[in-house]
Amino acid sequence: MSDFRTKLLGLTSLAIAFAGVSYGQVSCTGGTQTLSPVAPIELRAESQTELVSDIILNCPASGVIANGQLTIFSSLPVTSKAQTGLGGTANSEAVLTLTNNGIPLGVGNPVIYNGTVSGTVVSFTGINFPANFTAQLSNIRVNASSAGAGATPVPVTESVFAGTNGQATLVQNNIIVGYALKSLATPAFTVNAQGNPIITNYTVCAGNPVSAVAGGATPSLSFTAIVAETFGGAFKLQTSVGNPTNQEQGSYAPTPATPSAIGSASSGTEISLTFANVPASATIYVPLTATNGTLTLTLTGSPTVATTPAGLTVGGLPAILGPAPDGPVAFTPTAGTVTATYQVTASSAANVETVNIPVYVSFAANSAAAQGPITVLEAYAPTSATLAGPAPSVPLFVVPTNSPLNGSSVSLCQTTLLFPYLTNSTGFETGIAVSNTSTDNLGKAGASLATPTPGTCTLNFYGNQAQPTAFTTPTVGAWSTAAGSPSPVYANTLTAMTGASNFTGYAIALCQFLDAHGFGFIVDSSGTFSGNMGYLAIVIPNTALNPPAREGNVGNGSAVAK
């Protein structure tokens, strides 16, 4: 802030030095100075090409000046697009519109001058000031990211000096032309009733498959990204009739406008979702358009809508993404990354707007390895390193510094069981049984809701003597009537498993399949006590080993635990 204040003090001193000129002056005696729009607009702190408010100078009683100058000093670097072929020293899309209020509008009235941009200064030269004029300064863009603004607005100012022969006799100092503040809301996922992000995690053996067959597998929603602005008008159209504050295009743009023409914009506001750590076998599905009220985001480029036989039917994915040709759109990862960029195609500056983008990460069972979360980076687009001069295109944003969100994970198909009391001392014996219940008839048409998966269980024992060697069971099969299939239940005694007696303690079994269940049965064969007892093993959430998924690993949006 010290540099900012020093600059303003320097400009004030310059104005005092020029105030004594008494001949051939550009002045606004009896006139007024106003802003258009009336109030300074809110500027996006993430933008490097932010259009500030126009300044209108109404000067009904000025000296007639030939070959005058008008200079703007901005508190932020000026990034108005460079233009060629303008003549003289002009190099910018920044425009001065000078209207002679003493003659009818028509050919030659108003007169358009292009500016020369250098750092924080815009200069207009060779100006013929009439005795009664209105000057409008348009297409002044600044690097708002250099204001260092966050949630608290930072004023952006311009000072205007006009005169001739290097002498400024018209001075409008420290005009606030906008307030810079953070405009893209902190990225987030939708949440449940407890305020926790709704994220579906997956397992290697189940995957999240899509079927092109009617009535086949439907993938689960992985997560939903929220895109929101912090103030109305942050999300802008490429052009907007009647509301220049709701467009990326400049406030002055001659017709026809092209991406390289004065005042034109290459696109509306764009927002990108960059997914990283995506399994190579996965496909990401997002909607072609996302709409909520007055806001609509549309995928840019030429996205291909997924249709049969590409692996998806309207019935194959929930209707939230919409039927073809509106969606869904399929993306496959390159080096684990997918970027989906949306452009604002409908918006209202009168509303603070938000929209949800549902995301489906689909992959076949056993096609991906266990891994940490898929991450999502939400940001404006396009971005570049900090601009040192005129912008190559509009809009252009600063490289984001926010942290990606953690989305869906893929975990191993494991269940952890706790047998809390085991003993084979003083005439007691404990029987241990483990069942593989990953087969059921709870799905469509009696199909298994789970993914039947065989696997082994490794038991580690903890008790009153040196820890016995870990015991690994033979394969415990998923229930099947096929001949030769491994048994879905494994049972044995504590003595046989540990090879030792006089043990009292507990055991933890790590089973390499979902939906494992255990049973312990303690038998008294000594005659000291009368009776036997049995209990169910406790399923321990595997959050220390793997992200949650299903039974023993229950996560948001997971399958029904059995």
Image (cartoon, grey):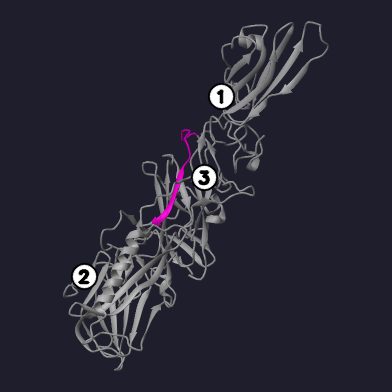
Whole-percent x and y of residue 396?
34, 60
As drawn, which residue projects farthest toward the bottom? 103
Local SS, label 3: loop
Which mark is first along the chain, 3 or 1? 3
Q: Is the magenta stretch mostly helix, strand or loop?
A: loop
User: What is the spatial separation of the Cα atoms under label 3 and label 2, in whole angstroms?
Assistant: 55 Å
Q: Do the residues labelled 3 and 2 touch (CB within 8 Å)?
A: no
Image quarter where the N terminus lies is bottom left
Say if 17 sits above or below 388 in the image: below
Whole-percent x and y of residue 212?
51, 47
Which mark is first along the chain, 1 or 2? 2
Q: Which residue position holds label 3?
A: 210
Hey, what amino acid is under mark 2?
Asn
Q: Label 3: how many residues lie within 10 Å, few (<14), some (14-19) or many (20+)?
A: many
Q: Label 1: how many residues lie within 10 Å, few (<14), some (14-19) or many (20+)?
A: many
Find residue 464 and report its image quarter: top right
Span shown in magenta: 366-380
Whole-percent x and y of residue 438?
62, 31
User: Which residue is pictured at 33% across the width and 88% down the height?
Assistant: 29
Hey, what amino acid is under mark 1?
Gly
As drawn, which residue projects farthest toward the left? 88
Q: Label 2: how many residues lie within 10 Å, few (<14), some (14-19) or many (20+)?
A: many
Of tags 3 and 2, the one toward the viewer is 2
| Label placed on residue 91 | 2
User: Which residue is pictured at 55% across the width and 26% down the height?
Assistant: 512
Local SS, label 1: loop
Q: Nearer the viewer, residue 158 or 264?
A: 158
Q: Which residue position holds label 1?
A: 455
